[in-house]
């Protein structure tokens, strides 16, 4: 019996793999082969080429950009095994998943958990099709690490809220269609006075100003709300539930950030060092100190990757979030920064180019990535906040406040 | 913690319970007080072998359970938590050397005895104070081995030495041609310099060119497992202490400066555990062992070094006293850090494996 059902399962797997291959063959434009969309956690503006658009539409229609989301809301409805096959086959064909951004990484999973039926029907399918870009309205000038201190106020006007206030570090705000925001609906209760609201970015009274960062780019904005009318239907969950929902969303964010630290991708540190400094007759780096430091960073990077894998395995086995997950964000972001710093140092001044001739594209991109990477230990709950969370929630050390 | 099967969970729980109840740190204190140079309790070792712990990496046909290195690591970790003084780590490595490199006769002669506790094995590799398997002068002529070995762990209780000579690994029994000079190290366990003068030696001829490296990688990972238990114990003891000690009318655990240090150590410990378990799993899978073992011991060295220092500092003055256990972990830690590869040795090896 076991053999028979195993064979059935195998043939099901094979059939699905064949289905994916056929789909990729028919829809993936060969011109896009090997190119990926570096969306990460931050949305990128700019126009799509016709090829890119066609690929996005094809995969979005199928729901395979969000493979494990429920089919009824436009997701792929795939199980984990099938999703893994989909990824394998996309990679094999040099294709990429064109559906990404905050809607996929953070907002979608949260809305699927807390949204009502009408909200899910309205907002999830356009995310699956990659049509609507979302931005995050969380931080304020006086609410960074102390996020619950937020003051943007949504006043109850019967059938709608009237929103006034200022958000900052709004990732991709200048390109976003909609914003998921946490706002204050009650000034008398710090945490229970917060609600989770969805705001159209083209509503009258919304003004967006990009912020130029040390990397020279402007991935974040200040967003001002002046008498912005938001329909009551756009409240997710209940009034006062925003802190709970908002924190849940941050868990998705932190999981995504931890692996995405700066300094990954591109050549390895040792290859970079071989290119930019002397190698002895045995192929060893002649600079023994540098060699030692590279090994040190790479050993710790290895054990970080092993820890990330262990967190996934443990969470799966015990059916809940593994306690080491709380350490992943701070470990991964710090190590990513260390790797980026070392890469810069290995290249000398050639690794510090800002713009212009004399630098390769990857060299210039490396500088910007190194600078931008400084944000990773600050956003999504700074390292210091992560330490508070570990101390209090995991280690049971008492609240210092 | 790696995802375990039922067998492994039972083994771990049994080891945890035994170590906590039968072998708390007070047992190490008794061993120390006895002053016996072999520095372990024979009765305790007999209890361990009765439970099958000495035969975990030995095939069933030779009297072991063949559960593998992850299982052996689980037991060793629990023993490390309470600083159990035992030759079980070195005995396991000696056994694995015979499993990897021995012929049928050698296996039949030694493995059942190493599994049952009838004999104890250890590893004699280094000839100086630092780990350097590339610098071996010991030679064998006509089946007679001559040379000196430095700081051989568990030497006093050992019946069998797995000895590195210029041309490979050999089995040498204690007795004729083997003399021993005690070297008292800070961990107050068994260490000795050995002089072999024409001692009868049998080559482990079946392991191929890489036998010495293969055995040392197993030794690195299993020692790292012992260090993992020690690190876990220091972390938990220190955390408990911070939750009890009151100064300025406040429990120390409420001070944020201390909270963040503990959070850092929690993250370090998570990395150490991942690296050690991955090393054990690599040995069992037979894939990527050299790199995984190097990462395992390097991370064990880094994290145990830090935790052993922080453990003392966070205990304050009482951490400096012999009455508290935390100092024992510091002293044992430094000895194990230097065993089968210091941090700089391991970084060099990691870079060499990576081709730079």
Image (spheres, grey):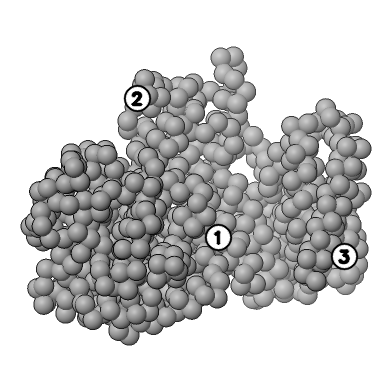
Within 10 Å of disc 3 (Cα), the crowding (few <14, some 14-19, many 20+) is some
Quadrant in the picture for residue B269? bottom left
Residue A230 drawn at (x, y percent): 85, 61
For residue B145, above or below residue B249: above
Q: Residue at x 64, y 34 (%)?
A: A217
Q: Residue at x 80, y 71 (%)?
A: A1
Q: Which label sits in the foreground, 1 or 3?
A: 1
The front one of B82 and A98 is: B82
First in sequence: mark 1 vs mark 2: 2
For residue A70, above or below residue B350: below
Instruction: From the viewer's perspective, tell me whether residue B106 is left or right of residue A354.
Output: left
What residue would you read off at disc 2?
A286
Q: Residue at x 55, y 76 (%)?
A: B6
Is disc 2 on the same chain as disc 3?
Answer: yes
Instruction: From the viewer's perspective, tell me whether residue A234 is left or right of residue B174.
Output: right
Residue B250 drawn at (x, y percent): 33, 78
State the CA–CA distance, disc 3 to disc 2.
61 Å
First in sequence: mark 1 vs mark 3: 3
What residue would you read off at disc 3?
A119
Q: Secondary structure at mark 1?
A: helix
């Amino acid at each position: 019996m076991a053999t028979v059902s195993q064979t059935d399962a195998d043939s099901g797997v094979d059939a699905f793999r064949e289905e994916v291959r056929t789909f990729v063959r028919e829809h993936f434009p060969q011109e896009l082969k090997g190119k990926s969309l570096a969306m990460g956690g931050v949305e990128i503006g700019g126009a799509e080429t016709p090829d890119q658009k066609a690929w996005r539409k094809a995969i979005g229609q199928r729901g395979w950009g969000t493979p494990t989301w429920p089919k009824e809301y436009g997701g792929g409805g795939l199980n984990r095994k099938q999703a893994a096959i989909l990824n394998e086959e996309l990679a094999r064909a040099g294709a990429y998943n064109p559906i990404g951004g905050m809607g996929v990484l953070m907002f979608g999973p949260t809305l699927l958990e807390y949204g009502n039926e009408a909200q899910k029907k309205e907002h999830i399918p356009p995310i699956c099709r990659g049509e609507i870009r979302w931005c995050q309205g969380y931080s304020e000038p006086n609410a960074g690490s102390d996020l619950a201190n937020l003051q943007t106020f949504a006043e109850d006007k019967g059938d709608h809220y009237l929103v006034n206030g200022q958000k900052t570090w709004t990732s991709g705000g200048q390109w976003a269609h909609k914003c998921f925001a946490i706002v204050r609906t009650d000034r008398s209760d710090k945490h229970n006075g917060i609600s989770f609201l969805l705001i159209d970015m083209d509503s009258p009274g919304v003004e967006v100003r990009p912020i130029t960062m040390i990397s020279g780019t402007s991935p974040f904005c200040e967003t001002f709300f002046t008498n912005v009318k938001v329909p009551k239907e756009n409240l997710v969950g209940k009034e006062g539930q925003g802190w709970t929902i908002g924190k849940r969303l941050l868990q998705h964010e932190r999981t995504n950030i931890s692996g995405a630290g700066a300094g990954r991708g591109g050549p390895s540190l040792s290859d970079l060092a071989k290119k930019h400094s002397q190698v002895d007759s045995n192929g060893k780096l002649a600079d023994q100190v540098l060699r030692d430091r590279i090994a040190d960073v790479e050993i710790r990077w290895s054990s970080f990757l092993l820890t990330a894998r262990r967190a996934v395995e443990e969470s799966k086995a015990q059916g809940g979030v593994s306690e080491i997950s709380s350490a992943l964000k701070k470990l991964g972001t710090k190590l990513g920064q260390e790797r980026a710093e070392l890469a810069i140092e290995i290249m000398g001044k050639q690794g510090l180019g800002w713009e212009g001739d004399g630098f390769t594209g990857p060299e210039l991109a490396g500088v910007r990535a190194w600078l931008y990477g400084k944000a990773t230990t600050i956003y999504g709950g700074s390292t210091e906040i992560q330490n508070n969370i570990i101390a209090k929630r995991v280690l049971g050390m008492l609240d210092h406040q | 913690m790696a995802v375990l099967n039922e067998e492994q969970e039972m083994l771990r729980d049994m080891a945890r319970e035994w170590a906590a109840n039968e072998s708390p740190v007070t047992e190490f204190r008794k061993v120390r007080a006895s002053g016996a140079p072999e520095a372990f309790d024979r009765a305790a070792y007999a209890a361990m072998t009765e439970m099958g712990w000495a035969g975990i990496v030995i095939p069933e046909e030779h009297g072991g359970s063949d559960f593998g290195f992850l299982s052996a690591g689980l037991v060793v970790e629990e023993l490390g938590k309470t600083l159990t003084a035992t030759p079980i780590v070195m005995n396991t490595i000696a056994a694995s050397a015979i499993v990897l490199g021995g012929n049928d006769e050698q296996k039949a002669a030694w493995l059942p005895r190493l599994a049952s506790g009838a004999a104890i094995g250890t590893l004699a590799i280094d000839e100086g104070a630092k780990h350097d398997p590339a610098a071996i002068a010991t030679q064998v002529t006509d089946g007679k081995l001559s040379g000196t070995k430095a700081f051989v762990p568990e030497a006093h209780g050992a019946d069998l030495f797995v000895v590195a000579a210029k041309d490979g690994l050999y089995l040498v029994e204690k007795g004729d041609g083997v003399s021993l000079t005690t070297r008292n190290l800070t961990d107050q366990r068994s260490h000795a310099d050995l002089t072999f003068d024409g001692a009868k030696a049998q080559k482990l001829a079946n392991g191929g060119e890489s036998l010495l490296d293969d055995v040392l990688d197993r030794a690195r990972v299993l020692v790292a497992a012992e260090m993992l238990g020690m690190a876990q114990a220091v972390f938990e003891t220190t955390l408990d202490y911070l939750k009890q000690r009151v100064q300025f009318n406040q429990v120390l655990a409420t001070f944020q400066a201390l909270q963040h240090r503990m959070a850092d150590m929690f993250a370090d410990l998570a990395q150490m555990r991942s690296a050690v378990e991955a090393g054990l799993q690599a040995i069992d899978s037979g894939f990527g062992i050299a790199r995984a073992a190097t990462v395992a011991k390097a991370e064990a060295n880094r994290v145990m070094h830090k935790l052993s220092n922080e453990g003392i500092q966070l205990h304050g003055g009482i951490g400096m006293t012999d009455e508290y256990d935390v100092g024992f972990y510091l002293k044992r830690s430094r000895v194990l850090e230097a065993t089968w590869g210091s941090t700089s040795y391991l970084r060099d090896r990691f870079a060499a494996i990576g081709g730079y």
